[in-house]
Image: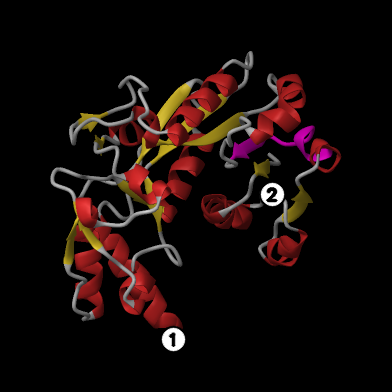
Amino acid sequence: MDHTLLSLGHGYSAGYLAQRLRPKGWKIAGTTRDPDKFRDFHAQGITPLLWDREAILPWLENASHVLISAGPTEDGDPTLALLKADIAAQATRLDWVGYLSTTGVYGDAQGNWVDESAPLTPATERGRRRVRAETAWSSIPELPLHIFRLAGIYGPGRGPFSKVRDGTARRIIKPGQVFSRIHVEDIAQVLEASMQHPRPGTAYNLCDDDPAPPQDVILHAATLLGIDPPPELPFEEADLPPMARSFYAESKRVRNDRIKSDLGIVLKYPDYRSGLAAILADEQAKQ
């Protein structure tokens, strides 16, 4: 059977999903607002589309699967603003629709565990935008929607090593603060598993098994590199920009049982230690 994925807001996580699907014969188109990225998309076997309704519509009308990665802004969800009526018109024909959200929708749990049944009580404006976007997507009748709430994403090219190396990493200490995170390759395998076993209307938490304080990750990265770690810095003394400070407004441990029970997922990187080791090994192999 021919499978066609339309990736709206094609970025880091969607790119890793495409790497899994392309060798299996999938046709993939991805949108971008930057025509300079067209060459890179072509090199990856992805048809590039400008963020333009007329460019996207022929692919939407022929897609079997749709992935939405573009996040909401203060003006709302950009995909719905551009394509809501068109997507609604295709709802009953589509096999699967995935929306990449965030665990920020749960707000602050004061370090306690949350699962997909937890109330959505975001503590930040970013989280509130995500809740509104999830609600808007869920309101489209008969759309085979799957919501993926992603923890902090890391992977090749996106991790602590560069900042540790150049001396800009900081070990900010806020007692009781803990974050969940997820390696991008595990995001990709969860998305593919959901495509193979769709359960419309389901929300999934995407995170590893080991929530941890952010300073522990920096310390481990420095240890792997053989570099002295940055000194500890109390949160109250850290001069953080508003965006960075807002991340510390929420502390929670996120459960991932549903991806295991529903989709049979065995995480490739169940904790940050295994994930960071793999990133560093990959970097060294390419040198």
Q: Residues within 10 Å of mark 1 (few under 14, many from 20)?
A: few
Question: Residue 117 sits in which quadrant?
Answer: top left
Residue 223: tell me if it is visible.
yes
Q: Which residues are magenta?
A: 58-68
Secondary element type, mark 1: loop
Left or right for 239, reference 134: left
Q: Position of residue 55 (x, y in %)?
A: 83, 43
For the C terminus, the image quarter is bottom left
In front here: 255 or 214?
A: 214
Left or right for 206, reference 13: left
Residue 263: tell me if it is visible.
no
- Seen at 39% across and 30% down, the residue is 105
* Residue 50 counted in the magenta span: no
- Seen at 66% across and 52% down, the residue is 25
Q: Position of residue 14 (x, y in %)?
A: 56, 50
- Seen at 30% across and 36% down, the residue is 256
User: Mark 2 against mark 1, which lies toward the viewer?
Assistant: 1
Residue position for label 1: 287
Q: Residues within 10 Å of mark 2 (few under 14, many from 20)?
A: many
Q: Position of residue 29 (x, y in %)?
A: 72, 49
Amino acid type for the residue under numbered disc 1: Gln
282, above or below 240, in the image:
below
- Seen at 36% across and 78% down, the residue is 166
Residue position for label 2: 28
Amino acid type for the residue under numbered disc 2: Ile
248, above or below 108, in the image:
below
Question: Residue 167 sits in which quadrant?
Answer: bottom left
